[in-house]
């Protein structure tokens, strides 16, 4: 245990430092902060939200309002949104504003000078939640993490980024003492990513695994098996919130390949998207349409071909699955026919699954399966990560630690 090596009093503050840590102790706030740490009164955690008017962002705001009393009772937490933004507007949120009102307030707000404005004074949030799918926002993660701000996100771009950004994100977490909470990037609320990270930390050696990682393609192929046309199944996936409004990334396999990158990085592999062998569900030429309506119209030309593939698989007592695999250093993701007795062939539309073989799971593989897509599940997973990040920010024994802010 580190011992105190210095103590200096300045007005109402004491600086206490050891070889490992610097603490700022506010005499006037001692009773309040200690009570917060003990859960006797809620600890207020300030949050900024990007993508607040998207489908996941809106649902997250509703959850923050709906679970406010439960969080205060069970976790001693009060989540206060101090800033919010979408792709065109931003605002500093006044206190005591219901979270669900933020999308309406954003509609009348001003364009942001830049994305970093969200975390500059007077906001200074302890946590930034990114509910966007923006590469530009993901590129800013190192700035926020390095400045002492935890990031919570379902955005796969940062966690599956090419090596320069991925390494910068890791370095910023180490330098800032922060965390990127990204469990919902793979499998929504399923405990896929957290389980693999736990196994890696425990020293388990993973021999191989296979997985169904795309909730969208799980839904689409499941509906094909039920007799629905490909174009109709994709349209349903968009309407039900399983796919993005423009589902090209799902159909190309890019979205699932990014998830495979994230899982492999959780196991300590230094891989990036270009290292994954990726076979799309449909021909690449069909995915070039600039708008979703055009894409869905083009998919009608693939309906007959996929109807024939499904019929042949049925005769052979097989089923089409969009399967990810890793074995002998080879990472692949592709549509494949599997026997109807295979666990993946029995998944319901939209379900994800992982089957993993390792030193720990030598007698029988570890299997995790369940619903892996949808607005409600993703928002619930983000909310769970947000609560975990907030609990990390609760002051301990009277310490009051604030993010240092992000320079322009």
Image (spheres, grey):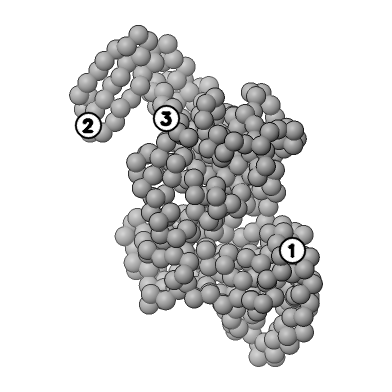
Which mark's residue is nearer the viewer, 1 or 2? 1
> Under tag 3, what secondary structure?
loop
Looking at this view, name the residue that lies furthest to the top: 11
Q: Quadrant of residue 356?
A: bottom left
Q: Residue at x 50, y 43 (%)?
A: 151
Residue 221 in picture, x, y percent from top left: 68, 74
**Mark closest to the chain's N terminus, 1 or 2:** 2
Q: Which residue is disc 2 drawn over?
A: 19
Q: Nearer the viewer, residue 168 or 25?
A: 168
Residue 126 visible in rendering: yes
The disc at residue 257 is: none
Q: Which residue is mark 3?
A: 404
Which image quarter: residue 17?
Answer: top left
Q: Label 1's element?
A: loop
Q: Nearer the viewer, mark 3 or mark 2?
A: 3
Pinpoint residue 98: horizontal percent, then vertical percent: 70, 29
Which sits in the foreground, 365 or 238?
Answer: 238
> In the image, what residue occupies the spot 32% across and 11% down?
10
Q: Name the residue rendered at 52%, 63% in the picture.
A: 258
Determine the secondary structure under disc 2. Answer: loop
Q: Which mark is residue 291?
A: 1
- Indicate whether 40 appears above or below 256: above
Crowd rating for badge 3 (residues with CA inside 10 Å; few <14, some 14–19, many 20+): some
Quarter of the image containing the N terminus? top left
> Residue 224 in the image: x percent, y percent?
73, 76
Left or right of 368, for residue 8:
left
- Label 1 – label 2 distance at C-alpha: 57 Å
Residue 233 rendering spot, x and y as whole percentages? 75, 70
């Amino acid at each position: 245990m580190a011992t105190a090596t210095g103590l200096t009093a300045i007005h109402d503050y004491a600086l206490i430092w050891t070889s490992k840590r610097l603490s700022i102790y506010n005499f006037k706030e001692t009773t309040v902060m200690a009570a917060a740490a003990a859960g006797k009164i809620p600890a207020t955690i300030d949050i900024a939200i990007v993508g607040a008017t998207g489908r996941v962002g809106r649902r997250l705001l509703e959850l923050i309002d709906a679970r406010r009393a439960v969080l205060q009772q069970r976790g001693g937490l009060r989540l206060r949104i101090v800033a919010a933004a979408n792709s065109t507007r931003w605002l500093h949120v006044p206190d005591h504003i219901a979270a669900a009102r933020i999308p309406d307030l954003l509609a009348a707000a001003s364009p942001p000078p830049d994305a970093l404005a969200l975390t500059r004074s007077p906001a200074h949030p302890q946590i930034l939640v990114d509910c966007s799918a923006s590469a530009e926002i993901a590129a800013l993660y190192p700035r926020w993490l390095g400045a002492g701000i935890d990031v919570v996100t379902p955005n796969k771009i940062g966690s599956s980024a090419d090596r320069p950004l991925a390494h910068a994100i890791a370095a910023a977490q180490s330098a800032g003492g922060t965390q990127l909470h990204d469990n919902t990037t793979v499998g929504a609320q399923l405990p896929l990513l957290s389980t693999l990270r736990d196994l890696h930390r425990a020293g388990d050696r993973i021999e191989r695994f296979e997985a169904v990682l795309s909730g969208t393609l799980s839904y689409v192929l499941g509906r094909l098996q039920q007799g629905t046309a490909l174009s109709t199944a994709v349209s349903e996936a968009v309407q039900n919130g399983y796919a993005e409004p423009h589902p090209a990334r799902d159909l190309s396999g890019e979205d699932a390949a990014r998830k495979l990158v994230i899982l492999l990085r959780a196991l300590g592999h230094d891989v990036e998207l270009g290292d994954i062998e990726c076979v799309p569900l449909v021909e690449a030429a069909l995915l070039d349409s600039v708008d979703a309506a055009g894409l869905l119209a083009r998919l009608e030309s693939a309906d007959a071909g996929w109807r024939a593939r499904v019929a042949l698989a049925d005769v052979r007592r097989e089923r089409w699955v969009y399967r990810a695999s890793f074995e002998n250093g080879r990472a692949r993701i592709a549509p494949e026919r599997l026997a109807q007795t295979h666990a993946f062939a029995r998944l319901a539309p939209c379900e994800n699954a992982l089957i993993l073989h390792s030193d720990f799971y030598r007698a029988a593989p570890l299997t995790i399966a369940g619903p892996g897509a949808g607005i409600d599940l993703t928002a619930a997973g983000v909310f769970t990560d947000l609560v975990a990040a907030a609990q990390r920010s609760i002051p301990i024994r009277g310490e009051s630690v604030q993010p240092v802010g992000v320079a322009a």
